[in-house]
Image (spheres, rainbow, N blue to C red):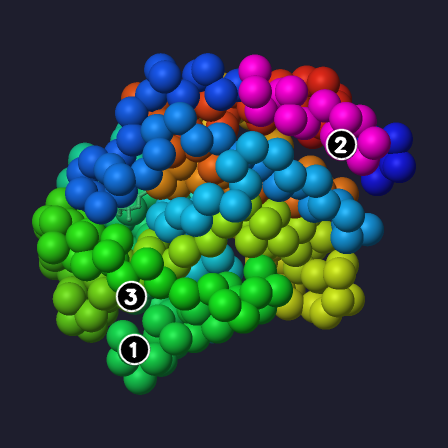
Amino acid sequence: MSTSEMARLEQSLSAWVDASRVYTSRGKVAAYIPELSKAPKDALGITILSSAGQSVSAGDSELKFTMQSISKVFTLILALMDNGEKAVFDKVGMEPTGDNFNSMLKLELVQPGIPFNPLINAGAITISSLIKGSGPAEKSARILEFFKRLAGNDRLSYDSDVYLSESETGDLNRSMAYLLKDHGVLEGKVDDVLDVYFRHCSIQADCADLSRMALVLSCNGTDPVTGESLIPRRFVQIAKTFMTTCGMYNASGEFAIQVGLPAKSGVSGGILALVPGRFGIGVVGPALNAKGNSCAGVRLLETISQEMDWSMF
Ligand code: DON
């Protein structure tokens, strides 16, 4: 990271947020989890944290939101740390689907009926079943503890309204989980597995939390702020590859071309992205495009990547 890059970000980030904010009007806040519909539609915020520990924020970076699908990157890593690569990839594949994040089409169409990857809902529910623990409470506690260490934030906790809202309305995920159980992919009780899944989706964060978690991935599993090694490098490599190929769902190809950074989005409007070895990025913008990604958040990342010449490709 050069000092001039940080100076450029400090000088321009607010203007880039202002210019991208107009795109919030083109999207819609997610409402299929009723509690999510309360989020402010025109909000947009960002925090960028450098490997030297310097951070710059702009816009509504202090807005709290639930991690939703962003959490899937880190439950995947914990499942890999708990079980190793072979056991995890016996249950989930490594390929993008080209389908919506909540589709179960290919579970029927393509044998052996395992989820195509760990970042679609079917895959992430399967990953939840692989987290070690005596029951859903212990598994969820281990996930929250892991997230706290990665974010360097002991105060991370659940948004219980969002958790309850998803738990009451999550019938599509429930039907998916029963199908997976029938295919012999899910072990244990479906309700227990879903409880772990709904809980980790409802972990609340802000842009600074995401930027710190992203920075750990960008530095191959070591938190550069504390020097502590938190994740084996191989598992970070797997996670970053999935982020690049599947992290923005069926818009991952377009995002790779326009932004060119590993990233993961969530339906609450968060995006976690990283510049390898240099920066962790957290973005929030609750208004979503048709593919479920933050409209203005994607636009902002396109601007930053192009202005800073950050694409990996
Ligand atoms: O299972 C769900 O539908 C949500 N808890 C998470 C989905 C999500 O964030 C997909 N993102 N784009």
**Would you say 14 lies left or right of 294 here?**
right
**Residue 169 lies in the magenta stretch:** no
**Residue 13 lies in the magenta stretch:** yes
The image quadrant that residue 279 belongs to is top right
**Would you say 201 lies left or right of 176 here?**
right
Q: Amino acid at mark 1?
A: Ala
Q: Pointer 1: what residue?
A: 137
Q: Is residue 309 above or below residue 266?
A: above
Q: Pointer 3: what residue?
A: 196
Q: Position of residue 90 (x, y in %)?
A: 37, 59
Q: What are the residue bounds of the magenta stretch?
A: 6-19
- The numbered disc on residue 10 is 2
* Tag 1 and tag 2, C-beta contact below 8 Å: no
Mark 2 or 3: in front is 2
Q: Residue at x 56, y 15 (%)?
A: 19
Q: CA distance from mark 2 to mark 3?
A: 39 Å
Mark earlier in primary sequence (1, 3): 1
Q: Residue at x 26, y 53 (%)?
A: 162
